[in-house]
Image (cartoon, rainbow, N blue to C red):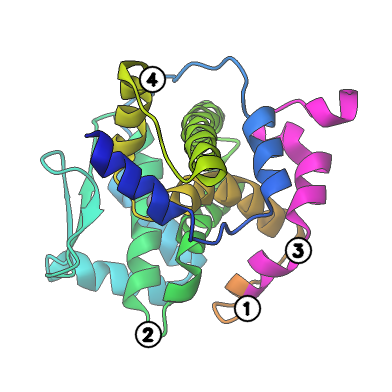
Amino acid sequence: MYEEFKTFISQLVNINICLKKDFVLELIDEFDVPIKKLNYPNNSLDNLSISLNFYKNFNLDYYNIINQGIKNKDIIISDEFNSHVNTKTGKTYIKLNDNDGDLITIIHELAHYIDRILNPHIVPDKYWFLGETFAFYIERELEKKLGQKYSYLFNIRKNNRLYMEKNLLQIVKLVLYYENKYLKTGKLRLTEKDSINIKRIMNVGEDNLINFCLSYPIANITSLYLINFCPNITEEEFCELCLAYDIKNFFRDNCHLIGLDNKTKIK
Ligand SMILES: [Zn+2]
């Protein structure tokens, strides 16, 4: 396990991080708040029809693509498999949990489906870390439409996003710690004490781990920017808009909107 981890860390060192290091450290600190994951209630919403209806009104092309995907069984919605895309067959699996959160899961995963099936993709491969931003952005479009009616749902989602992002940023913190150690001495001396951390890191199982973990807080912050400041976004300009704005300043001014107090400002 230790050898595998050493190789893993040494390889990560060469990967460019998609945000400036000082901002990554700021995010780790800002998201480090006491938070618990909340459970969604089950009011037996007709999640699939609400989702389809949303897409029908939002973008008719997307709606038709989704319907075709469901018909062809390229989109498989069930409670059997974890949500994922099978890259060999191109099939998208969407796992339901039999609660109201399924509405957001379906909207989110269908956004990934649309992004990947369009040619060219909305998020080109070189900007893969913005794939989540597109899915979060579509979630926020849903919230714009149904936020009043289902406010409880979006409040839980807001909480659970933070919960997940906090945990991912804690993983980043650990990786940076080991990277630093490795960079200083060219070696990694590991003991029994490190094994819990190593497991936490290796469980994420991503080659591009830091950028993968960052892609979620980036999605949370950037989707908020897009929904508030960029009306009528076209597919072509999506990534451009995500990359051109000042994420650091926007985050500092608006972190209360994603559920955080701005610690930096108070200091
Ligand atoms: Zn996603």
Question: Which labelled disc corresponds to residue 39?
Answer: 4
Q: Is residue 250 above or below residue 190?
A: below
Mark seen at residue 119: 2
Would you name the residue on which mark 1 appears? 237
Task: Give the CA distance from mark 3 to mark 4.
Answer: 34 Å
Mark toward the viewer: 2 or 4: 2
Distance Cα–Cα, label 3 vs label 2 = 25 Å
Secondary structure beneath dot 2 equals: loop
Respond yes or no on whether mark 4 lies under 8 Å from ligand 1: no
Q: Amino acid at mark 1?
A: Glu
x 29%, y 45%: residue: 205
Q: Amino acid at mark 4?
A: Asn
Q: Which of the marked residues, 3 or 2, is nearer the chain's N terminus?
A: 2
Q: How many angstroms separate mark 1 from mark 4 (CA)?
A: 36 Å
Figure quadrant of the C terminus: top right
Q: Residues within 10 Å of mark 2 (few under 14, many from 20)?
A: few
- Where does the image place residue 126, in percent across and percent down from the top left? 47, 74
Residue 75 figure quarter: bottom left
Q: Residue at x 44, y 20 (%)?
A: 37
Q: Main secondary structure of the magenta part?
A: helix
Q: Give the camera-side residue of 246 and 171.
A: 171
Residue nearest the observer in this picture, 72 or 4: 4
Secondary structure of the residue carrying tag 1 is loop
What residue sits right under mark 3 in the picture?
A: 245
Cβ at disc 3 under 8 Å from ligand 1: no
